[in-house]
Amino acid sequence: MHVDLLIRHAAQVVTPRGRGPLRGAAMGLLTVIPDGAVAVREGRIVAVGPTREIEAQITEAAEILEARGRAVVPGLVDPHTHLIWAGDRAAEFEQRLKGATYLEILQAGGGILATVRATRAASPEQLMAETRARMDRMLLHGTTTAEAKTGYGLEWETERRLLDLLHRLNAEHPLDLAPTFMGAHAIPAEYQEDPSAYVAVLIEEMLPAVAAWQLVHHGPWCPPWEDGRAAWFCDVFCERGAFDPEQTRRILEAAKALGFGLKVHVDEFEPPLGAVPLAVALRAVSVDHLVSTPPEHLEQLARSETIGVMLPGTSFGLGSTRYAPARRLIDAGGALALGTDLNPGTSWCESLPMMMALATRYMGLSPAEALTAVTLNAACAVGLGHEIGSLEPGKAADLVILEAPDYRHLAYRYGVSLVHTVIKRGRVVVEDGVLRIPGRQTVRE
Ligand code: NIG
Ligand code: FE
């Protein structure tokens, strides 16, 4: 066999296995291959196994990477980000440290609405530059595919600009983006007196406009779902001060009728609004946050096809000691993924290994479960479990070589990057911890 790239003599090659999510106890079952190798041809994995066995099958390798002393894991997948926005909310962070709550700040016109003002006012160049810098940091921390929500426009013109820019960034950057329309992120200032009028605009105008837009841009986005459809989602923030369960249901039903996959922000704060059964009944691909979700709803979720996405960076970012009950979901047989929730309010963090560090300490996950949650299960939470999320023949050659001999270091150590090499579709895009993006000019000022 002739291959384009052979990674060999890794201290260990570590991966979950399958195309669908791992549930319950299976989340902890990783394959660990000492002195492992991965062979790649035309951007896809063609063989994984002990170096001796893989080398016996190979007649020629165009490029060889020696991974001695280093562990190899699948490219990480971030299933929940609010990637594109302008500006920052450092002043609000300081207000929160002094005792103001997140929902109080939102109700006073700050929070998401402050970022909406900054985003509407920003030039496309500014939005591109700020978002590109975040994508670079994600790649440097091992993320090779990420979901990316709109939701800081809250009017068609700006929401469409965000979709256009995400589309351009996806095309120019090695990181693959799975786009989510989140016009239902907050009630915009101009509809504060009449939220139901905004819900009507979302259902009657914006969702059909997004559906029409995606028909035009179907091609260059990230790989299609298993059934061939483009990976597109619609998400709603179901919370006090945002959208109530009845509004959420109407928006999601309209999105589903237009062919969107569904995601829902549920039970991030107290009191839980009880939207998990609604999301499960609508066969949402994922329900996200789940901090205050009652046990009976977690059990219902565990019995469903819907994946629970938990976001420990948000608890940490808000200075809360309350983390989502991951153990209960897994022990009930559910499928869990972890994301960063990358956003300027509750969790400005591009690093999935940081989420693994938090989830192992505060949510009771084992390092193996945490790795499954940011690889295969996260891939399934964006509809791409058939394409990415594990190191198996046939899947895209997205993988990370760690500056550590054992995958558990990803959760064990924190606050620094242990990523040595990132390979996206068979091409090295991070080398020795430094970005290597083809065509990117580095201009120093
Ligand atoms: O997931 N909760 C809604 N959205 C984000 C926060 C966005 C923001 O504060 O800008 C979240 O926590
Ligand atoms: Fe979020």
Image (spheres, rainbow, N blue to C red):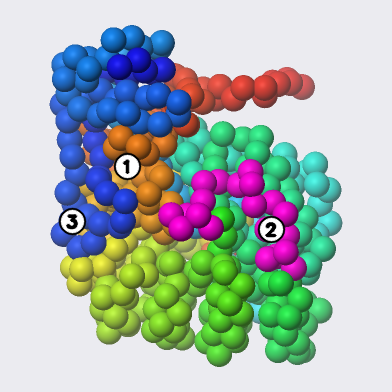
Q: Position of residue 64 (x, y in %)?
A: 36, 12
Is there CB contact under 8 Å for labels 3 and 1? no
Residue 304, compared with residue 60, is above or below; it is: below
Residue 248, compared with residue 93, is above or below; it is: below
Circle 3 sits in a helix, a strand or a loop, which is it?
A: helix
According to the image, label 2 marks what residue? 215
According to the image, label 1 marks what residue? 390
Q: Mark 2 to mark 3: distance in Å?
A: 38 Å
Q: At 41% from the left edge and 36% from the top edge, which residue is drawn?
A: 396
Q: Mark 3 to mark 1: distance in Å?
A: 14 Å
Res. 226 image quadrant: bottom left
Most prominent secondary structure in the magenta stretch?
Answer: loop
Q: Amino acid at mark 1?
A: Ser
Query: Is residue 223 part of the magenta span, yes or no?
Result: yes
379 sits left or right of 443 in the view: left
Q: Quadrant of ligand 1?
A: bottom right
Mark 2 or mark 3, whichever is nearer to me: 2
